[in-house]
Structures are given as C-alpha cells and as structure tokens.
Amino acid sequence: MEAMLQSNLKMAVVEGMRADARVGKLISALGDSALDCHLIGGAVRDLAIGRVPLELDVVVVGDAVSLAMALDSKHLETHERFLTATCQFEWGTVDFASARVEVYSNPGELPDVFPASLEEDLGRRDFTVNGLTIPLTATELGEWPAVEGGWADLDAGLIRVIHDQSFIEDPTRLWRAARYCGRLGMRLEPTTARLAHEALTGGALETVSASRLGAELFRTTASDERLGALKTAQELGLLSRIGGDALDFSMLAAAAAILGTDVAPQMLRLGALWWKEPRAAEFSRDLGLESQVTGLAAQCAMGEVLEGALAAASRPSEIRVACAGWVPEAIALAGATSGLDKARLWIHELSSISLPIDGVDLAGIGLVEGPMVGVALESALDHLLDNEGASHQQLLEVAAATARELGWQQ
C-alpha cells in the first residue's frame, strides 16, 4: 500500500513537471548540466500535492553558483557563503543550491556550509516533506534520493523534523512549521510538536536575532498565508514571545468583514496581533518591522481609546471625530468589539463624503486664509454629515457662524 501511495505522489510530480512550461525552459537553458540537477524540497512537495510551485528549487551535484552565473538570466543573485544562487528568467525564478552540509557553531546562528553529496544534503533539511528529490530530466518513475519517511509523511499531511535537534539548531524552523500547517493544511507530527514546545520553553528563540524573528512574523502574516499559520503559531507559543498571545481570531474575522474583505489582509493581522498591547510599538521596532507597521502597532496599543470614542459617538459628525487620525485597520478592529456598525459606516460611507465648499468659497465672503478657515470648514463638514442634503448656502452660513464664534468680524 505504501509503495502504491509513493508511486501516486511521484507520478503527480512527473506529470506536474511535464505540465509546467518552466521546467522545459529550464532544462533547455541548462543543457548538459541538467543531468547534475534535481528538483528538491518545496518544488517537489508542491507538485506532489497538486500545487504549482512559486519557484523551482534545484539542488546541483557540483558548483551551483558557477552554474547559475553561466546561464543567460534576467537577474542573478549569488550567496557564495551558502553555495546558493537565484536566477530570474523571463519565465520565472529558480533557486539553485549546491548539495551541501551545514555546521552550526552556535544555536540560532547562521551555519557554516560545505559541499557534500546529495544524500548528505537531504539530512540537513528541516522537515521530511522537504527532503524529496526528482532528477530534473526524469520522465518516468524511479528510486530517487529522499529522506526516510518523507513520501509517507507527505501523503499523511504530517510535518516532521528530520532530527531531534532541528529546532535547536535553527529555531526559525518553528515559524516555518507553522506556515506549512497553515498554507498546506498539514499538522505537526506528535513528536515534532513536543520538540517544538521543548525548544520554546528552553529559550531557543532567544538565540535568534530580533530582525530574523521579525522577518518570520512578516512572512507568517503575509496575505497569501492562511490563518492556520497564525493559529499554529499561537498554539506553539510563538506569539507570546512577541506580545501577541492574546490574538482573538473571531475579532480578526469580524474586523475583516467590516473592511469588506473575505480574508484578513496582512496589516489587519498584525494589528489584531497587538490589539491593546501597551508595548506594541516597542515590539514592532525591536523586530525591525517597517515604520508603517510600527505606526499601526502604536495605534493598536491605544485601541481602548478608539473603542470608547466609537461607543460614545451617536451622530455621524461624532463618528468622524472619533475616527479622525486612525488607520482603517485600527478602526475595523475597534468596530469588531465596540460600535461595529459605526466603524463600517465610517469606512465605507462617511469617510468618502467631500465638502462642496472650500477656502475659495470662504474667501468670497471675506474670511481670509488662516487657521480659522480650517476650523470653519470642519464645522461645515460636520453639519453636512449630520444633515444629508444640506445646501451650499447653508454650509457657508455654518462656516461663517463658526468663524464669528472664533472672533471673526465679517
């Protein structure tokens, strides 16, 4: 039975390669060098389960960097320290890597890399489902190098580490495991789940730089990842290390509905992660995330203020004042717990209403340019929001009355 299951998965890979025009173009570009190349890792895994790989991962039995440099690619990026190169062609992207072994001098640090055999290379990989290969020129089934149990785990939908020290050597694999569970609909094999918890409680993530953790968080919250990745990360305890252990998925879904999206976008996920977390901006900065994310985090840290303002608002003009200066993601999250209809009303209707008078109109009645003009126009906008259909003249009169209250003498 197991042999039959493996044959079915392997046949899916062969057929997927035939159907993927990139493979044929890659073989043509490589020429005789294709004989030294194998598809490996995510590309094989995705083809086996009927997914189209975003990129083709190729392991080279030899010098991958020199091979890549000899190709006629649109853009080339090499990392000679790691024996890898990425080629961007007109038809797609290919990641090349020499068959290699990795030696970790200290847990959490980047490894030292040395050339090795293909079989040795498989032993350094993270999970069994990523330890599968197929010759790039394969046209029929064969006995291809693979990590023991890799094909069976792929069929069973299990994420299993290849060795017990995997999470200690590279703790970012904890985040990677969460993403696989979310994106591929897989689950952690029981022993792997135990090793993950042990690594976390043992302080494994403390050996990883904050910027690397920030990059992992950003990938995990990316728009093409399913919420299952975040849920697994929460179950493992990854989110508690960055202040997001209170992430409420029902609130996140409600906020997405307020924004009008079926799937919560990345910025909304990040906002929900740090909703009402006092140190949100600090966490974001420490993780090296971009200023836009840190700005969102700072607002979400004060989410209780926005919730209160929305709850107290009754008229459209009060909703405008409550939402002024807040980003849509924060407003949606506040609406998910307080004043849901008000948040939706602001995002989809009130925020797009424009005032039909401006400074030129006010100059026409003698109100000269200055701070008073802005206050007068805001007053007119509030009147328009609260009185649908207010006329041009009525709005001018409201603006003028506000200016007079502020000391303007007409």
Image: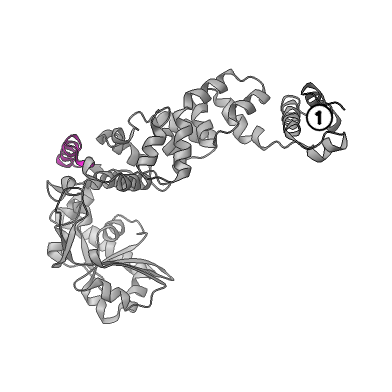
At 14% across and 40% down in the image, what residue appears?
Answer: 191
Q: Tell me if residue 106 can be seen.
A: yes
Q: In this view, does 318 lie above or below 189?
A: above
Residue 295 falls inside the magenta stretch: no
Q: Residue visible at 38% across and 78% down?
A: 72
| Residue 140 rendering spot, x and y as whole percentages | 23, 70
Residue 139 appears in the rendering: no
Predominant secondary structure in magenta? helix
208 or 274: nearer the viewer: 208
- Report the span colored magenta: 189-205
Determine if the magenta segment contains residue 199: yes
Mark 1: which secondary structure?
helix
Image quadrant in which you'd find residue 138: bottom left
Q: Which of 199 and 14 is in front in this view?
A: 199
Quadrant (top left, top right, bottom left, bottom right) of the C terminus = top right
Q: Which image quadrant for residue 247? A: top left
Q: Position of residue 236 (x, y in %)?
A: 25, 36
Residue under pointer 1:
395
> What amino acid does circle 1 point to?
Leu
Residue toward you, 360 or 230: 360
* Label 1 CA crowd tier, 10 Å (few <14, some 14–19, many 20+): many
Q: Position of residue 205 (x, y in %)?
A: 23, 41
Question: Is 366 on the left-hand or right-hand side of 348?
Answer: right
The figure's colour scheme reads: one colour
- Give residue 110's quadrant in the image: bottom left
Vertical position of residue 124 compared to residue 373: above or below: below
Residue shown at the point (33%, 41%) measured from the top left: 229
Coordinates of residue 248 in the picture (x, y in percent): 39, 29
